[in-house]
Amino acid sequence: MKFLRMKPGHGEVLIAEGDPQVAEEERELIEAFRAQLDAGMWAAVPTSAAGGRREAEIVRRFDQIPPDADRVIFFPRAAGGAVGAG
Amino acid sequence: MLLATIATAVVIVALLADLVAPRLREAYLNHRARRARAPRVAGYDPGRELRAEQRARELLRSCVNEEEWAMYRDLGFIRVWGRHDGGGRPPYAYLVYPHKPIVGYLPQTRELLNEYCVEFPDTERPYGSARLPESDDVLAKWMALTGDEERLLKTANLHMPGRQVDPRAVRRDLWRLGEWERHHARRRYASTPDGPDDLRSQAQLPGAD
C-alpha cells in the first residue's frame, strides 16, 4: 500500500509504503496516516464501482481503508474559496 | 515634384500605420497577458510547475474512468453526477474546473443551480505557493465530491450562478459537452461489436446501472 500526498509545485509525493499485513509496516503506515491527518490533510481511496464508474472513498481512520486498496491519496482539506480563487 | 513625393510617402505611411498599428497593439497586449498569467511568487519555476502538472495529470488519469479522463483532456473540465437521489429530485451534476468554482446544474434543462467556491490550500506552502497543480485541484474536487459530497458542499462558499464563472461560458461548455458526448458515443459505437448495448455512458445517470 502506498501513501501519496498532493503537493504544490510537485504533484504527488510518496510519503509511505508498506504491507499492512506485516505488523511493523502496518505501524509505520498508521503513524504516517495520523501525521497527515494531523497536518490537516484529507485522505481518499480511489475505487472502481460497477459499470466502469470510478469514485473515491474518504477515510478518516486507518481501519476504514479498504483491505484491497493499493494507495491512499492525501490532499489539503477543503476551504471555502475567496473570490477569484475558485 | 518633391512635394508630391512627400505627400505620397505620408499617405503610404498613414495607410501602413492603419494596418500595422492594430497588430502591434495586439502583440503588445498578448505579451502583457502572458506575463500577467505567470504567478508572481518568489521562487516560481515554470519548468517545475509544468513537471508538477504532468505528474498531476497522470495521477488524475489513474483515478477517474476513461470517459472522464477523455472529457478533461478534450474539454478542460469533468462532469460529476450528484450523489443525492430520491425525493422526486431530478438528476443534477457538477462541472469541475481547475481553480474555478464547481458549478451545479440540471442536465435535463441545462439550468445552472449554484457555484460552490472551494479550494485546497496547502498551508505548508512548499515553493512559496499554497496552490495545487491544476489537475490535482480537479482530482481533489472529484475525490471530495464522489467521496463525501455533503461535506464538501458544506465547506464551500455557496453563490448564485454568475458570481465568478460567466454563465454564458458555462452554457457554452454544456453545449460542448453535449457535442463531445455525441461524438464520443459514435466512436464507441463504431469500435464496439455489440453496438448499442455497450453505448451507455460510463458516467451515466445515477441509478441507471
Image (cartoon, rainbow, N blue to C red):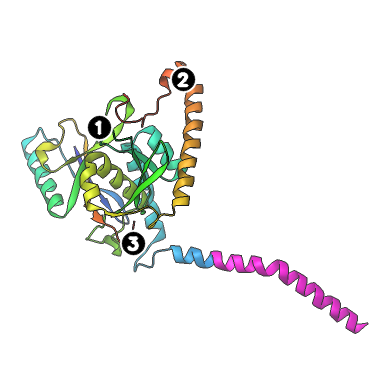
Task: Pick the residue in front: B50 or B31.
Answer: B31
Q: Nearer the viewer, mark 1 or mark 2?
A: 1
Task: Give the secondary structure at mark 2.
Answer: loop
- Where are the magenta residues, as a range? B1-30
Task: Pick the residue in front: A34 or B102.
Answer: B102
Return the residue at label 3.
A83
Residue type, numbered disc 1: Gly
Sequence-wise first label, 1 or 2: 1
Task: Give the secondary structure at mark 3.
Answer: loop
The quarter holding residue B91 reads top left
Q: Is residue B4 above or below residue B70?
A: below
Residue type, numbered disc 3: Val
Q: Is residue A5 magenta?
A: no
Instruction: Determine which of the numbered discs, if any, sits on residue B86 in the image.
Output: 1
Q: Chain of mark 1?
A: B
Asked if residue B93 lies left or right of residue A13, the reply is right
Residue at horizontal 44%, vertical 51%? B167
Q: Nearer the viewer, mark 1 or mark 3?
A: 1
Return the residue at label 2.
B192
Task: Give the secondary structure at mark 1.
Answer: loop
